[in-house]
Structures are given as structure tokens and as C-alpha cells.
């Protein structure tokens, strides 16, 4: 529940699910929202710095941007990472500095979509995140643990909050 000083979400900051990845069409999905005591630019910077993901986010391994000058996400940039033993190759589909980041990913028997929307100002941000996946691996995840996607997204949000708040005043 937002407090009186927390940035309020607005309709312009809603998640934009691509065709086939809305919650009603996905095999597994999650949505989360969190207030952070850091400016939107600081939150966005932590999120796009793939070279720090292994330090900043629980469960992330072998994160890398193979492009020259890699280490950070940029428009249309490809990157790779492992999350809970699932290897994903992804490509940035939306990149609005300080405000919105989305990527689509592909792994063995899974296709994913992940979006981050950041709003706020004056050292405070509200992060809205969404995750959706389709494919046999997504179905297996849902059947093994129906709350796993939501728990993982919640961990990503908490980790992002910790990283952004500890790095910038």
C-alpha cells in the first residue's frame, strides 16, 4: 500500500503485455509493484547494468551482454542469463531511459516477456514489474509450484530496491 510520500502509479505507467503474453494467454505470469527510496534514473541504471546482475539479483548466473561495449542493456540489445537453472537468450524490446524497460526471452521449451515501469521523482520511485511465459517449461513450473513466478518476481523487485537504495542516496 503506497504511503503519502510514495509516487502514485498512473494509467500511462501500466504494463503493456504483447500479443500472446497477457495474463489470460500466458502459461504462467506475475505482476508486482514496489516503492523505492531512489530516483527513477538510479533504479533504471541498476536494472540495465547486466554486468552487476549476479551481485544484485538472487538466482541470476552467467549474465552477459555479448555486444561490443556490453555490460549494459540498450535498445534492441541482446543479452543472456540463467535464472534458477533456466538459460535464457533475450532481446530488449522497449527502452525508455529512466522509465520503461522490456525484453523478450527464449529458452528451451519457454518464451518469456518481462517489463519494468518506473515512475516518480525527487529521490523516490514506484516500480511496476510484469513477467509472462509460455511453453512446456512454463507449464511445468506452474504445475510444480503455482506461486513460483510471483515469488521470483517479488525477489527481483526486493533485490532491485536493495541495490538502488544502497547505491544512491
Image (cartoon, grey):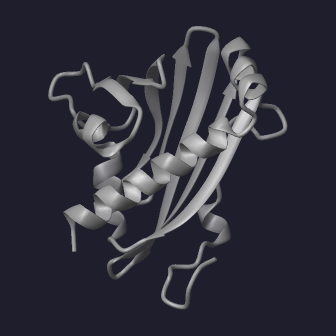
Task: Using residue 102 as the reference point, say whether residue 25 is left or right of it.
Answer: right
Residue at x-position 59% and y-position 33% = 113
Task: Using residue 145 as the reference point, say whether residue 39 is left or right of it.
Answer: left
Vertical comparison of 71 with 87: above or below = below
Residue at x-position 36% and y-position 74% = 37
Among all residues in the image, which is located at the extreme left?
A: 69
List x then y, in percent, for residue 91.
44, 26
Among all residues in the image, which is located at the extreme top?
A: 108
Task: Using residue 136 as the reference point, say whether residue 37 is left or right of it.
Answer: left
Q: Nearer the viewer, residue 31 or 119?
A: 31
Q: Nearer the viewer, residue 77 or 8?
A: 8
Residue 77 showing in the rendered view? no
Image quarter of the C terminus: bottom left
In this figure, what is the number of numbered marks?
0
Residue 48 showing in the rendered view? yes
Among all residues in the image, which is located at the extreme right?
A: 24
List x then y, in percent, for residue 25.
82, 32
Task: Quadrant for residue 29, please give it.
Answer: top right
Residue at x-position 25% and y-position 19% = 66
Vertical comparison of 85 with 126: above or below = above
Task: Quadrant for residue 109, please give it.
Answer: top right
Vertical comparison of 72 with 112: above or below = below
Image quarter of the N terminus: bottom right
Residue at x-position 34% and y-position 60% = 162
Task: Using residue 117 as the reference point, say whether residue 59 is left or right of it.
Answer: left
List x then y, in percent, for residue 168.
21, 67
Task: Quadrant for residue 36, please give it.
Answer: bottom left
Among all residues in the image, which is located at the extreme front?
A: 144
List x then y, in percent, for residue 132.
66, 35
Vertical comparison of 85 with 36: above or below = above
Amino acid at each position: 500500500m503506497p504511503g503519502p510520500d510514495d509516487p502514485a502509479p498512473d494509467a500511462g505507467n501500466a504494463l503493456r503485455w504483447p500479443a500472446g503474453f497477457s495474463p489470460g494467454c500466458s502459461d504462467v505470469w506475475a505482476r508486482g509493484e514496489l516503492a523505492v527510496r531512489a530516483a527513477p534514473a538510479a533504479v533504471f541504471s541498476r536494472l540495465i547494468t547486466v554486468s552487476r546482475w549476479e551481485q544484485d539479483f538472487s538466482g541470476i548466473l552467467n549474465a552477459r551482454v555479448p555486444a561490443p561495449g556490453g555490460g549494459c542493456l540498450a535498445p534492441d540489445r541482446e543479452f543472456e542469463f540463467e535464472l534458477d537453472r533456466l538459460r535464457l537468450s533475450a532481446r530488449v524490446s522497449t527502452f525508455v531511459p529512466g522509465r520503461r524497460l522490456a525484453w523478450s526471452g527464449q529458452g528451451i521449451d519457454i518464451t518469456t516477456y518481462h517489463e519494468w515501469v518506473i515512475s516518480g521523482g525527487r529521490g523516490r520511485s514506484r516500480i511496476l514489474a510484469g513477467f509472462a511465459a509460455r511453453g512446456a517449461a512454463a507449464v511445468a513450473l506452474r504445475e510444480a509450484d503455482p506461486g513460483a513466478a510471483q515469488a521470483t518476481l517479488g525477489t527481483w523487485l526486493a533485490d532491485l530496491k536493495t541495490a538502488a537504495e544502497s547505491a544512491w542516496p
